[in-house]
Amino acid sequence: MSVLKRILDPAGRADPYRFFGELRASPVALQEDGTYLVSTYREIVALLHDPRISSDRRNLKGDAARLADPEPSFIGLDPPEHDRLRGLAMRHFGPPHSPETVERLRPKMLSLATSLIDALDGRTRADIVDEVAYPLPVAVICALLGVPEEDEPHFHALADEVVETLGPGEEDRAERERARRAASLELSRYLGGLVEARGREPRGDLLSGLVTYRGPEGGMTAEEVVSTAVLLLIAGHETTINLIANGMLTFLRRPELLDRLRADPHLIIPAVEELLRYEPPVQFVSSRVALDDITIAGTTIPAGSPVVLAMAAGSRDPGHVASPDEFVLDRPRNEHLGFGGGVHYCFGAPLARLEAQVVLGELVRRLRGPRLVADPPPYRPSAVLRGPRHLVVDYDGVAPA
């Protein structure tokens, strides 16, 4: 079995990192299915900034191009179309036009975290994923977009289906693409109804802004608003769930980390950065295509070939970072790949950072004597968006808010 197959094997989901050293021995490696896997930090960064690497799978050679989404969201497009759509979305989300959007959500995040942790009081066991790490990011992204939170059961299963069909490799791509497209289509229908409603009666949410904005650079079509909303709804909570769950698991395995964070709550900021390096919620970027022959690390990737970037392996590359397999709470100059890089640097990075800082900070501060019930915990199937399905802990009580 190849190194990649061992990493993708669900049996190894709890610790894929033991295979990364072997993976990095060949920085650019051709896989059996024709995919080129890149696993070292320097080479990944170079390709993230290389205009000869496309994010549009319609540029694949042969039959594979026909399996690509015919109308991808901006994450699956290249400049200049990517830049136009991302710029229109960012206009309502962050600097320079909406610099306070994320920070204004801090009180809501803290209020939600407080109420979710309050609900754990009077008990001695809880599932951190189901009871804290999942409901908070969902509530925040719903509030930001303008999606009714009571509709969560409707889009939860669809979002999970989309996530679980993502992954590196081409050999079963057709089946995964069909499943992903079916779930995405149903999610698009749901969000399309909300887009129509916001067009008739705009509110003060991001969805309304995307629908109604018309400026010198134009605006989004209804179809572009829907594809952007699908992307933001899924990406806005799926990765953050994993970041919070991976973070709490890491802290519980190292009680001295809990002690240091309780003694100095401000350390939660560098702690989250180290989590993004050490236990990143996104392990692979599997949607890249070579537009031209690219020679890197002594290997030529032919034009039209699929390219997979092993981000988690790159962030633990000993050629880039000292003691890569150790969690260093206040690691200096922490340059990681947790949010990707280049023009596709994670759109929601400021939101995910703040959510993780708030939720993990409150969990560390308020849970008394927390300890794992099962280690390793059960993991979600996805090797790309990797995190515990459940994280059950016993604890002695809950401190006051």
Image (tube, rainbow, N blue to C red):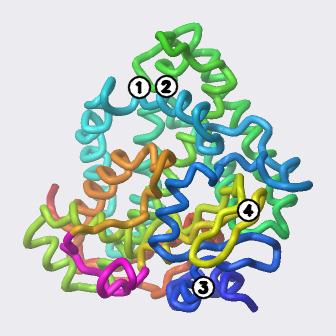
Closer to the N terminus: mark 3 or mark 1?
3
Name the spot of residue 111 as percent of width and height, x first. Answer: 26, 44
Report the magenta residues as a range: 317-332
Find disc 1 in the rendering and name its residue. 91
Q: Is residue 264 visible?
A: yes
Instruction: Determine whether the residue tagged by mark 4 lies in a helix, strand or loop.
Output: strand
| Helix, strand or loop under label 2 | helix
173 or 161, nearer to the observer: 173
Say whether marks 4 and 3 touch (CB < 8 Å).
no
Above/below status of 17 relative to 96: below
Residue 371 lies left or right of residue 69; in this view the side is: left
Mark seen at residue 26: 3
Residue 215 in the image: state x and y as whole percent.
Answer: 47, 11
Considering every residue shown, the one lying at the far left of the view is 263
Report the number of numbered marks: 4
Q: Which callout, 2 or 3, points to the residue nearer the camera?
A: 3
Label 2 sits on residue = 88
Give the residue at the far right of this rendering: 63
The alpha-carbon separation of the residues under discs 1 and 4 comes to 32 Å
- Residue for badge 4: 306
Task: Tell me whether the residue at label 4 lies in contact with that at label 2, contact meaning CB atoms closer than 8 angstroms.
Answer: no
Q: Is residue 233 above or below residue 84?
A: below
